[in-house]
Amino acid sequence: MQNFIQFILRFHALFLFLILQGLCLYLITREHHYQRSIIYKATDELTGTVYTGVTGTRDYVGLKDVNDSLVAENARLRERMLMLELMQISRKDLQADTEWIDSTRYEVFKYRAAKVINNSTDRIGNFFTINKGSKDGFRPEMGIVGPNGIVGVTKRVSKNFTTAMSLLHKDLRISSLIKNRNYIGTLRWNGGDPNYARLTDIPKHVNPELGDTIVTSYYSNFFPDNLMIGTITDMSLDGGSNFYSITLKLSTNFNNIKYVYGVEFEKFNELQQLEQKTYSE
């Protein structure tokens, strides 16, 4: 209380000036209509500026919630697109394997949104970290995709975070398909430029062409088939070889990854256990 009284005494002249100034303004606005309109107009402009600033600040602070909402909506739309695509396949193809597609690809792939909080592209074995973990439905060996194509495969998972092996990792192999040729090869990154990778196991009778689209194949357990990977930019037949050496430009910009989606294959464990038992016999 003593400090408050000292503060009042120290600045009493300023407080007295402000009180008298306010009284003068009141008397002027009460007796003179023109001055009153000018002051009200200035007050309205000042108030509007303050409200605009407050609203802009509130909107900026709320951008995270907006972004999170949009990413979650994108995940739902991706599931819907996959469903519609497979329904079209079912109408066009009534063979026995269509039922297998509908019962696995259609029903069990789910998308879970996440944000990349750490990423590397300058190593021979690159990883990235996302802000979702086991409590959000993430687990090891889940495919990760971005807005423009595949990104990697999850490696380790804690309660709140997940680390994933980037497509830019020397040990990651992805079953890939030349879309227009319907022929499967193996995608790998050998280091160097993060914008390019190699496609192997493509024999010369396939006759790929520059610009051909490379997508995920139906042999992948991590991804739905037909997800974008990249396009062929260079190819050659090594001397005496019957297989092409193919370079493709990746559709994902790994230097600018922000939001991604975990692809949950609900029957992955069942499939993995069955295959392991088969191979061990």
Image: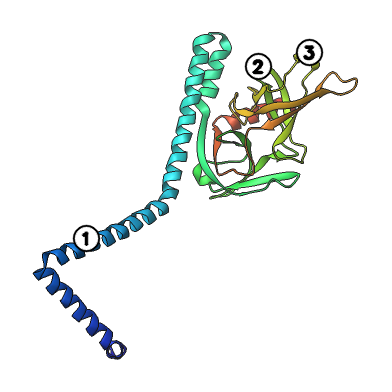
Placement of 119 over or under 271, stated as above or below: below
- The residue at the point 53 percent across, 8 percent down is 94
Residue under pointer 3: 205
Residue under pointer 1: 41
Q: How many marks?
A: 3
Placement of 225 over or under 71, stated as above or below: above
Q: Name which residue type carries label 2.
A: Asn
Q: CA distance from mark 1 to mark 2?
A: 68 Å
Q: Name which residue type carries label 1.
A: Lys
Image quadrant occupied by the C terminus: top right
Residue 95: image location, x then y, percent:
56, 8
Q: CA distance from mark 1 to mark 3?
A: 80 Å
Badge 2 density bin: few <14, some 14–19, many ≥20, Cα 10 Å: few
Does the residue at mark 1 contact the one at mark 3 (Cβ under 8 Å)? no
Q: Nearer the viewer, residue 100 or 123?
A: 123
Q: Mark 1 or 2, which is nearer the eye?
A: 1
Q: Which mark is residue 180?
A: 2
- The residue at the point 49 percent across, 15 percent down is 88
Residue 115: image location, x then y, percent:
53, 45
Q: Quadrant of residue 28?
A: bottom left
- The residue at the point 73 percent across, 44 percent down is 125
Does the residue at mark 2 contact the one at mark 3 (Cβ under 8 Å)? no
Describe the element under mark 3 as helix, strand or loop: helix
Q: Name which residue type carries label 3.
A: His
- The residue at the point 55 percent across, 14 percent down is 98
Image quadrant occupied by the N terminus: bottom left
Describe the element under mark 1 as helix, strand or loop: helix
Residue furthest to the front in view is 34
Q: Using residue 164 as the reference point, say whether residue 23 is left or right of it.
A: left
Badge 3 density bin: few <14, some 14–19, many ≥20, Cα 10 Å: few
